[in-house]
């Protein structure tokens, strides 16, 4: 199981394919072959769909523990 986190492209560099290269590079890592990956995105659903990511099949089963600050 893996969690893809903190992938972002500064606004000035968006639209230049940087995010595609970043995600493709991560997914090409041999150690990640066959591992189920989870991610959270606010606005890049279309980007991740291009790489095969889909909505969680049972989001009602997902839980999160938010540590107090």
Image (cartoon, rainbow, N blue to C red):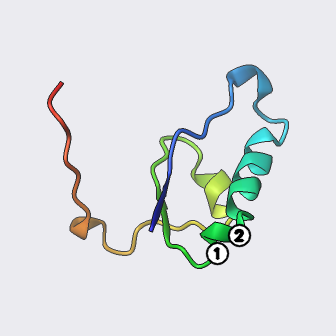
What number is the disc on residue 20?
Answer: none
Query: Which of these two is toward me, 36 or 49?
Result: 36
In the picture, measured across the screen, residue 8 lies left or right of residue 64, that is right
Q: Which residue does the image show at 75% across and 64% down from the upper left?
A: 28
Viewport quadrant of the N terminus: bottom left
Question: Toward which corner of the image does residue 17 lie, by quadrant?
Answer: top right
- The residue carrying pointer 1 sits among few (fewer than 14), some (14 to 19) or many (20 or more) residues within 10 Å by Cα, namely few
Tell me, yes or no, if residue 50 can be seen here.
Answer: no
Mark identifier at residue 30: 2
Who is closer to the viewer here, 16 or 65? Answer: 65
On the image, the x and y values in percent for residue 34 come to 58, 79
Instruction: Report whether 62 appears left or right of 43.
Output: left
Position of residue 2 relative to residue 68, above or below, is below
Identify the residue shown where x is 54% and y is 73%.
35
State which quadrant residue 10 falls in.
top right
Q: Nearer the viewer, residue 6 or 59?
A: 6
**Marking on residue 33:** 1
Whole-percent x, y for residue 16 in the image: 85, 36
- Which secondary structure lies at badge 1? loop
Residue 7 visible? The answer is: yes
Above or below 42: residue 32: below
**Residue placed at 57% from the left, 66% from the top?**
53
Mark 2 and mark 1: Cα distance apart in space: 6 Å
Q: Are marks 2 and 1 in contact (CB under 8 Å)?
A: yes
């Amino acid at each position: 199981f893996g969690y893809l986190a903190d992938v972002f492209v500064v606004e000035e560099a968006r639209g230049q394919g940087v995010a595609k290269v970043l995600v493709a590079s991560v997914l090409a890592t041999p150690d990640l072959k066959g591992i189920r990956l989870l991610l959270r995105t606010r606005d890049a659903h279309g980007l991740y769909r291009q790489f095969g990511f889909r909505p969680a099949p049972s989001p009602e089963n997902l839980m999160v523990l938010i540590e107090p600050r």
